[in-house]
Amino acid sequence: MTPRPSEFDLIAEYFAPLAADAPGAYGLGDDAATFAPSAGCELVLTVDAIVEGVHFLPSDPPADVARKLLRVSLSDLAAKGARQRGYLLTTAWTRETPVEWIAAFARGLGEDQSEFGLSLWGGDTVSTPGPLSFSLTAIGEIASGCMIRRSGGQAGDNIYVTGTIGDGALGLKAAQGELDAPVQDLAALVARYRVPSPRVGFGPRLVGVAHAALDVSDGLMADLAHLCAQSDVGARIDAASVPLSDAAAACLARTPALIETILTGGDDYEIVFAAPPDAAGEVDSLAKASNLSVTRIGKLTDASLGISAVDVNGKALTLAQKGFRHF
């Protein structure tokens, strides 16, 4: 194992290079960074933390842990219609964390910085007795007054979701050896759990189209409930319309009870949004322009009707939980 460098050596060796393309980061040599948003824009800020044993497994590859950390925050920006610009990073390492693990973590961040076009602007490095924990603040920008909030949904709006739902929760089960499926399906689901795909090319296109939106992190039903609570509406979704990957569909066909995991399990990092019926054609066009599948799964209703997922016969499904909760 490589001898442990100091805190400042770690920053200089592995993290300062990630700030090289951001003039306002000053090579991570100062206490703060500077940034001027584009004319007519305002900043959009979001922060996420991930903890070993809660959001990632000790066996997960360090590069994937880093990529997930960045991507979950980029997913928040995308759901708000913002474009990503930079991020701040706090890392809490144990004294036993191998330097090789830290180096691979930094490489993962570098790979995603290149893919998504942003840079590290600053942060903090601390030690912890464990478990490993990381916090990332992502900074984006959007035309002033145009952020897509949770609170704009209206009864009668169509409910849409990007991509597929359930892969993250099923992937966690697969990674923990709790899912019976062919090897190729297990691998596909684990990959989706470890490295989600933030919809950064689609989210900004929803500005002026979607009434309300957020990303699916705690589970489709839980996050839809957040949208409904802020918009003072109800929702009814057709469970059979919820888009599934081939691997998830195969798992559900073998074990129908997995529908609850799919609807409530979380870790999908797709966008769920509400748009008026007369915007259906525009939503389809935006999806095609983004080369992304976008599926209508239900409607917003009057708040008095509550939130439900129904089967093909229109019968409400009984779900023991609505989504992931920390407490």
Image: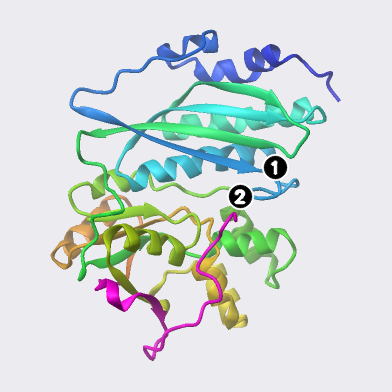
Q: Front-most of 111 and 324?
A: 324
Tally of marks: 2
User: Can you see residue 191?
Assistant: yes
The magenta span reads 298-327
Residue 294 visible in this rendered orientation of the protein: no
Q: Report which quarter residue 142 is drawn in.
A: top left
Residue 43, labelled with which disc?
none
Under mark 2, the amino acid is Arg
From this view, report whether residue 318 is shown above or below residue 153. below
Of 67 and 8, the residue lying toward us: 8
Q: CA distance from mark 1 to mark 2?
A: 9 Å
Q: Earlier in the sequence, mark 1 or mark 2?
A: 1
Residue located 20% across and 71% down the image? 156
Residue 201 location (% of width, % of height): 34, 44
- Picture quarter with the C terminus: bottom right
> In the rendered structure, are the residues bearing label 1 and label 2 in contact, judged by CB atoms less than 8 Å apart?
yes
Q: Quadrant of the image for the N terminus?
A: top right
**Residue at figure coordinates x 68%, y 63% from the top left:** 174
In the image, farthest residue toward the left: 278
Relative to the observer, which residue lies in front, 60 or 149? Answer: 149
Q: Residue placed farthest to the bottom in the image?
A: 313
Q: Is residue 78 left or right of residue 16?
A: left
Toward the right, the furthest residue is: 1
Check disc 1 and give the amino acid type: Pro
Label 1: which residue?
Answer: 61
Image coordinates for residue 114, horizontal then vertical, percent? 47, 29
The residue tagged 2 is 194
Give the quarter of the image for residue 7: top right
Secondary structure beneath dot 2 equals: helix
Query: Taken as a whole, is the magenta stretch helix, strand or loop?
Result: loop
Q: Residue at x 43, y 45 (%)?
A: 75
**Is residue 284 magenta-colored?**
no
